[in-house]
Amino acid sequence: MKNNLKFKNYLNFFQQYQFYLAAALSWLIPFFIYLYSLPPGVTWGDSPELANAVITWGVPHPSGYPLFVILGKLFSWLTFSSPVTGLNLMSAVFEAGAIFWLFLIVHYLTRKNWITLLALLFFCFSRIWWQHGRIIEVYALNNFILGGIFYFAIRWISQEKYKDLYLFALFIGLGFSNHLTTSLFFPSAISLLFLTDYKKILKIRVLGYIFLIIFSLQLLYLYLPLSANYSQAIAWNQPDNLSSFFKHVTGSEYSVFRDFSSLSSGINNFFLCFIIDFGVVGVGLALLGFLELFTSKFKVTIFISLFFASSVLYVSIYSVQDIGSYYIFPFYAAAIFSGIGANWLYQSRLGKTKRQKFTAFLVIAILAGAGIQKINKNYNLKYQFNLAHYFGKQAWKELPANSIVISDTDGASFTLWYQAFSMNPEDKSKVVVTKGMFVDKNKKWYRNFLRKKYNSVKWPSEEMHKQLHGPQLLQKLINQNYEKYNIYGVFYFRPSIANYYFVNKGWLSRLVRRKDLKGKIKSNNSIKWTYLTEIKYFHKQPWFINSKRNFSSGENLGCVVEWINKHPMVKARWEIINSRGNLVKSKMENATRYKSLSFFQFKIKNKHQIPGNWQCNLYIGKSLSSSLQFQISTN
């Protein structure tokens, strides 16, 4: 009797608080999955540039993202191994928070707990969503704010309480202080005048409160001129006057990426990605949810659909490398429909007959199976883009004092920024130059920053920047400093620099004149960089999970070379040489000019546990073009 009574008490407690339990799980489950997959440091892309801005109180690229920088600073102060760990954690917290908002939205519309949770967990492990839950980017915070906007807008449409309208305005204001794509809500916001009682909105007092809430939050942008005037950190566009401030906040320099002629192909690319990321189950549920919501809550459907349409239009004409990050905006709207569709399908099949019960169970099984399949498919994200962390640490450590390193891609450049300005701010003997920004006639602010920070370098004058073009300016910079500085480069698009030769040194290549071509390693015109890694296989695909020089028995050592863009045809040969000077293994490969990467795998066995320095040598033709040393543990 006592056991039965205790069980009933537990059951009553569960039934009474199941909403709170399901809501908590909607945040906790994705958070711990994202936490498990956090990278060891910065990743490729904007991650190191944003981390540098947060750590140094700098100004990141347009539009400046003041809310992200300020909140990021708080997370960077948490007692972890490094500030960047706190910033990665921030993404996990807010991306999981965005799923929590999704749960509240779908639950508000359906009043169902567990089927809603199951449907949204299926969504949160999709590739694009999961990726932004583990890296330093503005999108996790943006997704969290997106959820708040949707939730309170839907509540306002449903019951027209001013509290919900003001909270909607609050999240709109927060959105604009983080990312200007919040403007994609403009058609939906205007539709509220027609979907609800416009007289309630157009009252002078109400409009005053709305504008006060939204525009008071934009005061966060005052951080940009404050940083530009008082911080020694890099401040993009140096927004310390009205003209540069307006240019930076509006992101006008990125207008070149908007092209209406790409609309048709952009739409095709979006829906292809949508189908791949959501899968057949997710797309089907989204269509069912749209139809169900259209018939039951027409006004809510219009609001969500307008945002979806404006987002799709925007991403279709915006041609940037990381366009997948912008797909999250329409994906969020589709996820709401998907949650509604799962609830409708489950509820319509739920009944008293065995067939109805079996069908309802089948719906749950399909959702659970699809979610597990997504986790299994995407858990290798734990290793994606992590090489940036190892590149930064190893390249900086191996770079000798009195060196200038020039890079032409954002990934390598921003990672070196992070090392130079955040991790080693007092070390002015190692100079980092981003080629594209250095030669851009419109980026005088960047050159002024370099001149101020590295005043011992002989920089070409601004007059020269008006007269000379990109390669000529690089040539001038190198010529003026060659005798005093070691010159290194990381080039994917290798420039033509007369009288200089590229000699690979691993992650970096040294630029030398003919008279200084010494040693066994010869110059080449094909290698971007080389590194050693441990290879793991996921779904039969190789992943380079790190970069290191110490290996153990049982590991797959990878000797990797990444080639410059459209390199000449390469006849490559790898050799593994043990510490006794004996050849252990070799491999030949012909790399065509369109191949970006080649690697040689070496399975380490117990018999290879010989102390001392091993070598992975890369020959191009008959010339030794790269040599990387490593050790094998004898434990």
Image: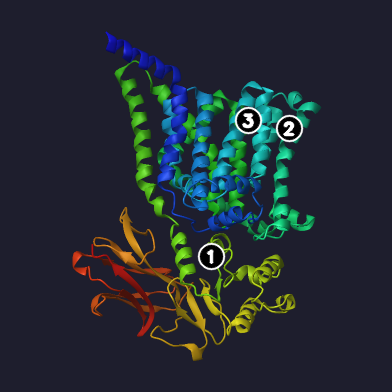
In the rendered structure, the answer to whether residue 575 lies left or right of residue 29 reads left
Label disc, if present, on residue 575 of the rendered structure: none
Kind of residue sitting beneath label 2: Ile
Which residue type does callout 3 highlight?
Ala
Kind of element beneath mark 1? helix
Q: Nearer the viewer, mark 1 or mark 2?
A: 1
Instruction: Write down the residue under mark 1.
Output: 416
- Lower sequence index among marks 2 and 3: 3
Regarding mark 2 in the picture, which secondary structure is present there?
helix
Q: Residue at x 54, y 28 (%)?
A: 293
Question: In the picture, which quadrant includes the C terminus?
Answer: bottom left
Determine contact: label 2, label 3, CB under 8 Å.
Answer: no
Decide if residue 203 is in sight here.
no
Residue carrying label 3? 153
Circle nearer the N terminus (3, 1):
3
User: Picture coordinates of residue 251 (x, y %)?
Assistant: 68, 54
Q: How is the image coloured?
A: rainbow
Say the numbered circle drawn on residue 210.
2
Callout 1: few (<14), some (14-19), or many (20+) C-alpha neighbours within 10 Å?
many
Work out how far the residue at label 3 is from the one at label 1, CA to CA, in angstroms. 43 Å
CA gap, disc 2 and disc 3: 13 Å
Badge nearest the viewer, 3 or 1: 1
Density class for disc 2 (Cα within 10 Å; few <14, some 14-19, many ≥20) is many
Marks 1 and 2, how far apart at CA: 43 Å
Q: Quadrant of residue 371?
A: top left
- Circle 3: element type: helix
Q: Quadrant of residue 407?
A: bottom right
Query: In the rendered image of this protein, does residue 237 appear above or below residue 133?
Result: below
